[in-house]
Image (cartoon, rainbow, N blue to C red):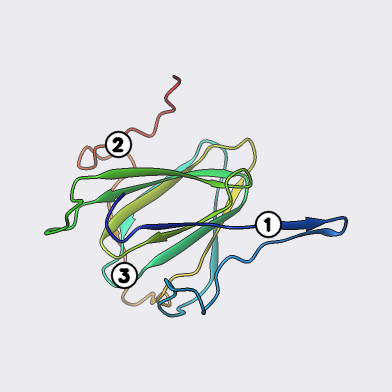
Amino acid sequence: MIDGVKVTPLKPIADERGRLMEMFKSTEPDFEKFGQVYLTTAYPGVVKAWHFHKKQTDNFVCVQGMMKVVLYDSRDGSATRGEVNEFFLGVWSPLRLRIPPGVYHGFKCISTCEALIINTPTEAYNPKDPDEYRQPAHTTDIPYDWDRVDK
């Protein structure tokens, strides 16, 4: 696992009225600080990648559909530099994924419906000075192929 990444299983609680699932609490050990909460989505088969942040830690929870979230560690001096991690988040895999600063990330909707991610990053977005550093989704600088692999 890439250094600084953390996967936290979430526990949906269901009854005859519906369900409840806590996604993130300020009392949890990996809570750093609150920046904002936002929703990002992807339509079936769409890839949204790659970017990283210099300051911000992301905390992803997929609340509808399924997303394949991929991380790549390009950080100088990291013990896991060059490592790629793949995670499946969504209704069939309720997880919170912590993505530390400096780690490239992107996702692909792998469900037949639009997939929704709620992110609780540590920093508020600043449109005048965005903390986002991008690469194209299919760059050869990152050793990852977004195509589905049938085994």
Q: Which residue is mark 2?
A: 144
Give amino acid for label 3: Asp
Q: Earlier in the sequence, mark 2 or mark 3?
A: 3
| Picture coordinates of residue 43, whole percent (x, y) | 57, 43
Badge 1: few (under 14), some or many (20 or more) residues near its Cα, within 10 Å? few
| Picture coordinates of residue 96, whole percent (x, y) | 50, 58
Q: Is residue 112 left or right of residue 89?
A: right
Give amino acid for label 1: Pro
Task: Choose between 27 and 77: the one closer to the eye.
Answer: 27
In front: mark 1 or mark 3?
1
Q: Is residue 78 left or right of residue 53?
A: left
Instruction: Give residue 131's mark.
Output: 3
The span from disc 2 to disc 3 (Cα, nearest Å) is 23 Å
Res 123 → quadrant: bottom left
Res 18 → quadrant: bottom right
Give amino acid for label 2: Tyr
Residue for point 68% across, 57% down: 12
Q: Which residue is mark 1?
A: 12
